[in-house]
Image (cartoon, rainbow, N blue to C red):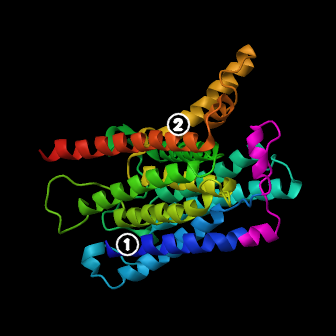
Amino acid sequence: MRAVFVAIIVAFAVSLFGTPLAIRAFTRLKAGQPIRSDGPQMHQTKKGTPTMGGVVFIVSTVIAYVAGHIALITLPKAQIGQVRPTITGLVLLGLFVFCGAVGFIDDFLKVRKRNSEGLKERGKLLGQLIVGVVFGVIAIWPIDAFKSTNQQTVASTKLSFIRDIDWLELGRIGAIIVFVLVILAASNGVNLTDGLDGLATGASFMVLSAYAFIGFWQYRHWCADPAYKSGYCYMVRDPLEIAMIGAAAAAACVGFLWWNAYPARIFMGDTGALGLGGLVGGLAVSTRTTLLLPILGALFVIVTMSVIIQRISYKTTGKRVFRMSPLQHHFELVGWSEVNIVIRFWIIAGIGVAVALGIFYADFLSAVS
């Protein structure tokens, strides 16, 4: 628990005090956010606001992870299973950093070209696909140099909901395909939800906090813990590592939100949105809660579906269901204020998180009763 608290404090502090430095640096570099000319006209006032702010909370989380492991060194090995960084940490932080790197390329091209085009859609998907495949292989294949105490891989070869579903065996290739699809869906879901001040940051904080709780709960009821005597336990790998990274990323989002809330002084850009989505997808797979993710990330699903519905409708009938997609921009054009949209969407995100955690805990209660 000490390691998680240390990671939270460090991530929050680095993000909170590091973001103003990033604002000044990106302003000097003229890394301002280009605004779509066909978007809501009220967004034109945001033109020139520094972007690529996701760099701050990604770096904050990595620093916090290191600080958390320094705190672990002082604890008995029997309590934590493993002091050194794990393959789980490598996969989760790798997804965070490298999905963020794909977004960084997109943001850099937008700034350089001085328009909102950036990286082509196919190029962005290819980058995400490569990252997903590389870390999917690492997550699925046993690596002798990183053997765990319970011989688990980071991701499972079975499809999971609250835990692995025994009869849904995917095999390693199938598991990698599912892993990649989850990363693509999550990273693009967060990216589509971004677009209003603080919207994606606040929603991501809720989802990451939920995964921090799930990881810590699994750590307290871990099958590999010799001190745990109850019959109901979780067959996952490195749950404390999962809790630490989830909590650190959530705290980093809070520090960043101080400056990203309306009126935003900096945007996370695709750097932050794709990075956060990649991490959320990785947390879902590593906690064996893959099918719980659509409930936990309900807001991301709703926003993504609005884009899909809009495209299908326009291509098949030539008509638009919404005035503009993603959904948050539809409500802007209807006349809702930006703050009202953000708060109401946060409520939707919170409901999704509450329902998912309720399902997770209900499963535990039904098993131990």
* Residue 126 lies in the magenta stretch: no
Residue 227 picture location, percent across and down = 17, 69
Question: Residue placed farthest to the right in the image?
Answer: 113
Q: Nearer the viewer, residue 111 or 345?
A: 345
- Which quadrant of the rendered structure holds the N terminus? bottom left
Please say whether residue 119 is visible from this viewpoint: no
**Residue shown at 87%/53% (left/top)?**
114
Q: Amino acid at mark 2?
A: Val
Question: Residue placed farthest to the left in the image?
Answer: 369
* Residue 27 lies in the magenta stretch: yes
Residue 290 picture location, percent across and down = 43, 44
**Residue shown at 61%/73% (left/top)?**
18
Question: Residue placed farthest to the bottom in the image?
Answer: 74
From the viewer's perspective, is residue 349 above or below residue 228?
above
**Residue shown at 68%/60% (left/top)?**
266
Q: Nearer the viewer, residue 66 or 107?
A: 107
From the viewer's perspective, is residue 160 above or below residue 32?
above
Q: Are marks 1 and 2 in contact (CB under 8 Å)?
A: no
Please say whether residue 206 is visible from this viewpoint: yes
Q: Which span is picked out in magenta?
A: 24-48
- Whole-angstrom CA distance, mark 1 to mark 2, is 31 Å
Lateral position of residue 226 relative to residue 59, left or right:
left
In the rendered structure, which disc, 1 or 2, sits on the residue that comes first in sequence?
A: 1
As helix, strand or loop, the secondary structure at mark 2 comes to helix
The label shown at residue 301 is: 2
Lateral position of residue 200 relative to residue 155, left or right:
right
Q: Label 1 neighbourhood size at 10 Å, few (<14), some (14-19), many (20+)? A: some
The label shown at residue 5 is: 1
Q: Amino acid at mark 1?
A: Phe
As helix, strand or loop, the secondary structure at mark 1 comes to helix
